[in-house]
């Protein structure tokens, strides 16, 4: 950080700032006295409160941050991309990984049929919600543990690893028992108790950006998980809230190249929540691929008009299969790989 | 809800929509066949998924909502203002109630000195954070249960009821043991597990609007708590996130008259978090009073430049005392009462 | 500005930055070589392109701005409040000035009756639109010069100075002929051609903040007008666009204390456009007064449900008169004056 | 529109609403009396004020819009895509058209060298600003007519049609004399006087979305131009203002499929202004292509660090040439064409 002093500030004011800085263990505070203005450097480790403290001291005009407030999630000290391997799938490498499945697990037939289509079409990971955050208390809130079991059953049949949301610290253990990747949803991106808890795991976490979370805050939330020792964090852009109401959210695809610049962690995109309308999903999925995402997470449902949640943003099986073909073409155009379709077994 | 059909839609399409509606228990679906367009009414209780389901049916142009999706929190079925009494303080009536205290509980001396000043100045409720949500894992996260005990000690001395934040469902029990009002913070406004849990209490809950939460979503979150049987919900406007970065948040004071129109629940304002800068707090506190809020929650600290959190937005004792005098004057101008200052006891 | 260099940058990189700065006439570029990092100061006058230029140079991490980019509008070099006098009314002093009138001038009877009520209630300035910016080409776009004449007629009768909007540089002359204050609307806050043109006048300009304009950008737009020699700029907060759709805009009342801190220019608030709903206007008008605004601009109409524009946000005569009484009470509570009601002449 | 009445409203209230509707020439107002609620239809042509008027009538709960408020720009009455031909280039067809050039015209050498590289790389249209909207009055504001002449000279040499911004109605004639396409910038998207004026032309207009303009408002601004008889409007997504400050704007690529659904007009994307950082331009350009845009507008400069405006977002010649190769690959992957590179003439 750099502390900018007022023109004409006193030596005492400068010294008081220096003392405030150097009172922290290991900190130094060199002063540069210019003709017009003096400036004081802050050299030391991350200490978030210091900026606020200095801003309140007399004679201080502004405290400017230079370093990033996240060390573990940032690229500065970890220049190489992180690759996260779940069973036989690697996220963060040259393969662009598609995760697909219904918004909510609703029953065995729904889950298994979707899992089969996902697998056949080239998806590598299966998604499905067992615990659902719903803005109305009168909405379907998911099947709970029963849903986790159906996800595991679908994984056993298809071999696809499973990603599913965990909503509270108390559920981390049971969700981790069934899931291969634990999702922390947009509404929980700053549920720090939950972040602490998944930080204790040694399983990958898919961390979704919140509606109103900046890139920096998203990386700070990843830092929480990593500070607990869990380095396997996959970030997910899923749209932010803006004044535009036609789409459910505004999918901010610049997050993809920005996060790749600021961080070594993989970044995937969710065009289903990012638009909220199934007819916009294909265009935005392809756009995310062209922007360089490491993966996509897409909602697919056998009967979107009967879905218990998020039907309007789910693709039918046919639309999903068509989209996968286009995804492969666009990925190839930028030198990225996508898994090929898998022939359906004759007996199912 | 009203379902608007395409011009020239078929009778089969209309019937399919009617069937979808009437398949829900107790629902009716009268049709109005206009010259240009047909429209179908939806008559029944709250059923959030229905809108999505109908939007996907062939021939449907739009599904328009008429009723509000919240019944318990809405004013339609509860025309009278809810008044919530905590010990000898009533929130939601003609008295404008000031809640004051430090952002974080940091120690006995800090807490007690602040509580005394709060009391003497005419504040009626004491605030202080024992569990702190912090965007960086390297920040001070609060004293925990030790902090709760210091709050209780300050209440015992001053008689001021205590409001403090609870961050996770697991902590609800212990926080409820010490606190008079449990605060659900902005980042947890859609932590539905936590909302469910405080809904089981029979203690008041102060529910803060999230950075990116609409009025309707705030009322739906209140509905969660009330659906659990806890009707004592106090809503709090604390600023939303916008493109303007000079202030920490944009304090949306229109929330006060709007919430009073849509809901019977009390609404208070937090000018400290709403601006993030202590020198803006007095103006915005007075503005909130003039706008008709039922209460204010204000950060006060003996030494803002030594505060472990949110120093830049905390008032000194002197500034707080001055503000209280102005608050009394503005409240009187619009016919509202504020508690008078209390003479300090001689021995303290 | 301060240029922050990368750790381990070369001497050549530092010299290149210095040269880029010192090539501007009168600029100096002192270097501070720290142990970890070097930092280069930029000392000189306002030169907006320089920041961009420096950011692109090799070895540069960040270029941090210290000074404000506006000199004429800023308080740093003009510590005293600017007071603007229009006929017998002064804006920017201790009097809180109410401007009232219909959104659009629609006819003689409408304009005169509203002007009389405005006058009697204690408004000091008459508003009314003759040229109307409308988002649809099919909307009523104002009476044009005919409307200006009706405004002048109403002024002649009541003695109230007139504020009205000018939409394009070509119209500045004709509008200035009839109006006492020219309004530049929210949609034109960055219409730099128009700003240049009103900068040539020696008449006050009411400059409205745009839907998506920061405080700094608003002050830069004021700077445009002042750079032309016209120092009489009145700023106006009228709401910004956010994700909240219940209100037409989000009235950002923190703008009042912030602008008063950053600038010496008067700041008024427009609760009519700021909310878009008449029933919210009184609360927000009072809030703006309590926040310390120098004036209010309020829409009043004899028959809001017949208004050719913005009916839903206009007050009836009766509601306006009641509001004026409350405004006087709140202003008095914070030590501000508001003109008293004026007895209506017997013959009218 | 549909007018929703309160439960228990009176027959007189219903009749008053009907009268208000049917008093407009050619309007009809059928009533549907439900068991719980009555609803009144509004059948007639576009009449923007009617909604506001009806909302104010007693007994009315809500007025819901069904039809789109734009007829000429909307797809409903013009199902086929509009193709706009400028010299030998067609925008809106299967070819994805790249427009390239510097932010500002700065001199002959800069303009001609950039035009040559643009041409050789496969760009089809040349951009360059002669009149520049700048937020600070101290910034370079463009070369004016001299700049227009340099653009025309570059066109004469390369054969590339020219697009350049017009900032005010007065300049439309002179800009139209030199330019092939007139650009209306983001800050002027609701400068209705300018929209009226370019509506009188019979030359294509590139209309940029504003920082805070919804899709619907963008189409209403296009409607202004088309209402004047000029049907050749090209829409441009260039980023909206959000809380995220890392990027200059948030490029909202969902605008591409949404506008293609709502309108028959071509839609292009501007990844340079949309991100404000040159290193993000390639990813976002490719994303826009994959999302299905009809064209791109990209800033290219021989020496970005010497540019008089927007250097940080301009590509060097080399980066632009590399990007064009990637654009061709992604376009081909989704079945779209891009012009091939052109061999440079031997003598230059």
Image (cartoon, coloured by chain):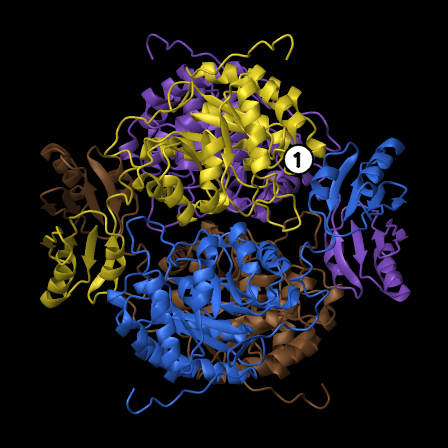
Chain colours: A yellow, B blue, C brown, D purple
Q: Residue D184, how many percent across, how many down?
A: 52, 39
Whole-percent x and y of residue C311? 69, 63
**Residue D250 in view here:** no
Q: How many other residues sit within 10 Å of disc 1, few (<14), some (14-19) or many (≥20)?
A: many
Q: Chain of mark 1?
A: A
**Quick check: C154 above or below A106?**
below
Between C273 and C334, the residue placed more toward the observer is: C334
In the rendered image, the vertical position of residue C336 relative to residue A236, given as above or below:
below
Q: Is residue A9 above or below residue C346?
A: above
Residue A283 occupies quadrant: top right
Q: Nearer the viewer, residue B326 or C317?
A: B326
Q: At 11% across and 47% down in the image, what residue appears?
A: C32
How many numbered tags mark residues here? 1
Q: Quadrant of residue C158?
A: bottom right
* Residue at (60, 86) in percent of width and height: C341
User: In x, y percent, where is residue A67?
Assistant: 24, 44
Q: Quadrant of the C terminus of chain B?
A: bottom left
Of residues C305 and B302, the one nearer the viewer is B302
The image quarter containing residue C62 is: top left
- What x and y, as percent, mark residue B195? 54, 55
Horizontal side of C69 relative to C173 (left or right) equals left
On screen, residue C231 versus residue D339, left or right, reads left
- Element under label 1? helix
The residue that disc 1 covers is A312
Residue at (37%, 18%) from the top-left corner? D321
Question: Which residue occupies the foreground of this view, D180 or B32?
Answer: B32
Q: Against B104, is B14 above or below?
A: above
In this orientation, does residue B134 appear?
yes
């Amino acid at each position: 950080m750099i502390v900018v002093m007022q023109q004409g500030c006193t030596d005492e004011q400068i010294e008081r700032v220096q003392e405030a800085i150097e009172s922290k263990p290991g900190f130094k505070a060199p002063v540069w006295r210019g003709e017009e203005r003096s400036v004081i450097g802050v050299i030391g480790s991350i200490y978030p409160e210091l900026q606020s403290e200095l801003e309140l001291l007399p004679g201080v005009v502004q405290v400017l941050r230079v370093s990033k407030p996240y060390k573990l999630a940032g690229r500065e000290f970890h220049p190489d991309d992180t690759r996260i391997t779940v069973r036989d799938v690697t996220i963060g490498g040259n393969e662009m990984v598609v995760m697909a499945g219904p918004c909510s697990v609703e029953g065995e037939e729904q889950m298994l049929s979707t899992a089969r289509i996902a697998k056949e079409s080239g998806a590598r990971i299966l998604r499905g919600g067992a615990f659902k955050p719903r803005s109305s208390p009168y909405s379907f809130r998911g099947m709970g543990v029963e849903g986790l079991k159906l996800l595991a059953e679908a994984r056993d049949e298809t071999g696809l690893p499973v990603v599913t949301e965990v909503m509270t610290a108390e559920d981390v253990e049971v969700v981790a028992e069934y899931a291969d990747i634990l999702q922390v949803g947009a509404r929980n991106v700053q549920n720090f108790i939950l972040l602490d808890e998944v930080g204790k795991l040694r399983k990958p976490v898919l961390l979704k950006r919140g509606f109103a979370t900046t890139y920096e805050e998203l990386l700070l939330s990843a830092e929480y998980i990593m500070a607990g020792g869990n380095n396997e964090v996959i970030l997910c852009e899923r749209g932010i809230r803006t004044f535009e109401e036609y789409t459910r959210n505004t999918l901010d695809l610049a997050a993809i190249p920005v996060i790749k610049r600021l961080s070594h962690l993989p970044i995937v995109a969710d065009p289903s929540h990012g638009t909220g309308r199934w007819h916009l999903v294909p265009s935005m999925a392809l756009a995310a691929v062209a922007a360089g995402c490491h993966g996509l997470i897409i909602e697919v449902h056998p009967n979107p008009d009967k879905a218990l949640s998020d039907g309007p943003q789910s693709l039918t099986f046919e639309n999903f299969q068509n989209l996968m073909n286009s995804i492969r073409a666009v990925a190839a155009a930028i030198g990225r790989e996508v898994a090929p379709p898998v022939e359906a077994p004759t007996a199912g």
